[in-house]
Image (spheres, rainbow, N blue to C red):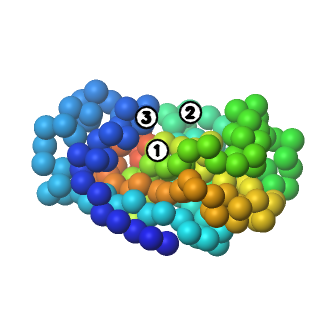
Amino acid sequence: MKETVISIEDFKRFIPRVKCISLFHYNLMNTCKLSEICTVTQSELESPDEIETLAQMNLVWYVDPEGARVMWDAPGARNILLGDLARQYGLDPSGLDGKLRETVDSIRQGLKKNIELICVWDSSLEARVLVDGVYRGLALYYIYITEPGILQSLMDSNFSISTVTLSSPAGSMLFPCDFINICRDRK
């Protein structure tokens, strides 16, 4: 995996794609010196096995104690792990919804542009949340477990697959909705 450090300014270009960040936190990111508390790296995945690094990422999708999909603020809600959900779809592809099925089919046909998955790593919680690119991440991992040969051809293309990760001990404060259940469960 090829990893490069990118600037906070470069990371901010991804922020408009992240839906859950509040206006307050967006303004905070634009005014404070995030470089004092954050680092940002971009890691290009170079082999299909490196997709395995996505498996333990928490998604911004949630389930209740019975496993039903719920909103982040439902009682007992917890983040779903990308690998767990993709493996579940691998066992029962009928669970793929319309948008996820479209994303899988589109990626299977070949990359038409770079894929970037935006993550936040909270180093105090030791937790990573995929804040943008859930469908792309799930589709890639689903293809990895169901058709690994296709994933190899995608990685051999002219387009890249990478994760852009903001790392900070304050990650959960910058993305509060995405980390609230993880914070609750770690207490």
Separation of marks 2 and 3 at Cα, in angstroms: 20 Å
Q: Secondary structure at mark 1?
A: strand
Residue of label 2? 71
Rendered residue at 43%/34% (across/down): 17
Residue 17 marker: 3
- Numbered disc in front, either 3 or 1: 3
Q: In the image, 84: left or right of 162?
A: right
Residue contact at pointers 2 and 3, CB within 8 angstroms: no
Give the quadrant of residue 25: top left
Rendered residue at 48%/63% (across/down): 44
Residue 141 at what x, y percent from top left? 68, 57
Give the quadrant of residue 13: top left
Separation of marks 1 and 2 at Cα, in angstroms: 15 Å
Ranked by sequence position, the earlier of labels 1 and 2 is 2
Total tally of numbered discs in the picture: 3
Rendered residue at 45%/49% (across/down): 118
Query: Which residue lies most toward the front here?
Result: 158
Q: In the image, 159: left or right of 24?
A: right
Residue of label 1? 131
Residue 167 at what x, y percent from top left? 32, 59
Disc 3 marks a residue whose amino acid type is: Arg
Residue 48 at what x, y percent from top left? 65, 68
Rendered residue at 75%/49% (across/down): 108
- Numbered disc in front, either 2 or 3: 3
